[in-house]
Amino acid sequence: MNKKIIAIFIFIAVTIILLLLLHPSSVVTIELQRESLSTTGATIIITDKGFQKHGWGAEYFLQVKENGEWKRLEPLSYIPNPDSIFPLFDYSLNEHDQLIQTLDWSNHYGELQNGIYRIVKIGFDPKTDEEVYFYSEKFEIK
């Protein structure tokens, strides 16, 4: 009887661990290099520790916190050709499963005003190639 209970417990524990490891938000982090932060850009470090790595391009957008809710920041104006802002090519992870990307949002958003923001990075699911959104830590412009 005790061996059955132990086996069931081990099975459940392994299943939970595998589900956590395979869930995209548990294997991808976006760290903001604080010393690089300015009103016009920042450098981020994306770490992807999943078994199957996500696809990464240049695309991202910013959100601003207003009245306790995250809202997508509106660009300065309509951009008929988004490729001029985000070139169409893939980025590769380095030997540490990381991608270091310097973002310059001055052409798209101008200089950020005082407020609390976060970066939303668009990745691509390795199985379905569908877009997946990953959120950086929040940062404040003063």
Image: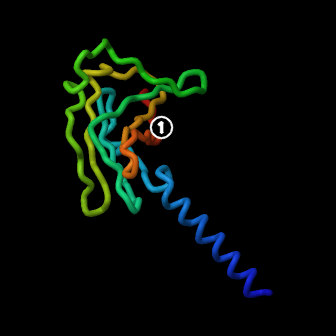
Q: Give the x, y percent position of residue 76.
A: 32, 14
Q: Residue at x 37, y 38 (%)?
A: 122
Front residue (pair 34, 32): 32
Q: Residue at x 55, y 60 (%)?
A: 19
> Residue pushed farthest right?
1
The C terminus, quarter of image: top left
Which quadrant would residue 73 be assigned to in this image?
top left
Q: Which residue is mark 1?
A: 138
Q: Quadrant of residue 75?
A: top left
Please name the residue shown 27% across and 55% down the image. Answer: 93
Q: Is residue 52 left or right of residue 21?
A: left
Q: Nearer the viewer, residue 87 or 142?
A: 87
Q: Nearer the viewer, residue 14 or 64?
A: 14
Which color scheme is applied?
rainbow
Neighbor class of circle 1 (other Cα within 10 Å; few <14, some 14-19, many 20+) is: some
Residue 63 lies left or right of residue 10; in this view the side is left
User: In x, y percent, where is residue 6?
Assistant: 71, 82
Total numbered labels placed on residues in the image: 1
Q: Position of residue 68 (x, y in %)?
A: 60, 26
Q: Residue furthest front?
A: 128
| Residue 17: percent from left, percent from top | 57, 66
Q: Quadrant of residue 132?
A: top left
Image position of 38 with respect to 17: above or below: above
Give the residue drawn at x 19%, y 24%. 84
Quadrant where the N terminus is found in the figure: bottom right
Amino acid type of disc 1? Lys
User: At numbered mark 1, what does the secondary structure look like: helix, strand or loop?
Assistant: loop
Q: Is residue 130 above or below residue 107?
A: below
